[in-house]
Image (tube, rainbow, N blue to C red):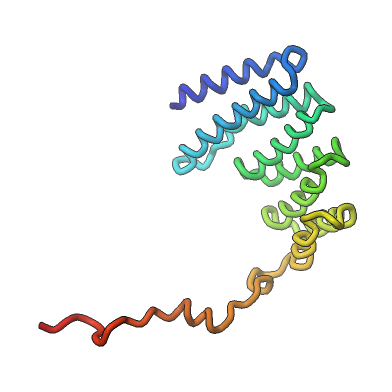
Amino acid sequence: MRCTFALTIMALSVALLDGCSKKSPDELTQIADQTYATALKTADSIRAFTPNIKQHFQPSLDAYEKIVTDCSGTSQAEKALIKIASIRQNDIREPDQAIAAYQRYLSTYPDGQMAPLSMFMVGYLYNNEIHNNDSAKASYQRFLDKYPQSENAPAAQFELQNIGKPLEDVLPPVPEEEEQTATTPPASKGKHSGSKHM
């Protein structure tokens, strides 16, 4: 299986290296998406055996990076930057690198379609993954100043109000009745409890 995966990645990577001048941005995106789909399948099958799956996503990152570099200014390049950030955040769990990718998107496409989400995700990652309260506060505040009507504005306000608080102070308390139900074993049915006497 690893041999097949390696050959597939090599073939897709070689095809991608032809550049934007020979392949359209759509063709390069299709190749990058196929590379990513292959990496996802491989990662899903080996994640239980090894925590280091970054190497399986590197060809995908390279493929999307090639789109960003060779096809700059296209909608495909804009989407590729978001895909890089998403892979780093969700698949290989590199929050620092994901933040850098979201920030790169914001500097390249400050008014891009994904700018609000990118700005929100910077605050989210600082708060929930890196636990850098000062950077999280600053990021969320920038987001709220620029996108007060965003669908993520309520979440950013909630996060901003609760940065640094213990989880038990943030979540609503469990009502006493529900708490007792959760800890009390169900009553046995019938007249007898325990074993039968013969």
Q: Residue at x 85, y 56 (%)?
A: 149
Position of the N terminus by quadrant: top left
Pinpoint residue 69: horizontal percent, then vertical percent.
78, 25
Residue 3 lies, with reference to residue 58, above or below; the image says above
Which quarter of the picture shows residue 28? Answer: top right
Q: Residue at x 70, y 29 (%)?
A: 64
Q: Residue at x 78, y 51 (%)?
A: 120
Q: Residue at x 71, y 40 (%)?
A: 85
Which quarter of the picture shows residue 172? Answer: bottom right
Residue 175 lies, with reference to residue 35, above or below; the image says below
Q: Residue furthest left?
A: 198
Q: Residue furthest bottom?
A: 191
Pinpoint residue 75: horizontal percent, then vertical percent.
79, 30
Left or right for 16, reference 56: right
Pinpoint residue 33: horizontal percent, then vertical percent.
63, 29
Pinpoint residue 56: horizontal percent, then vertical percent.
56, 32
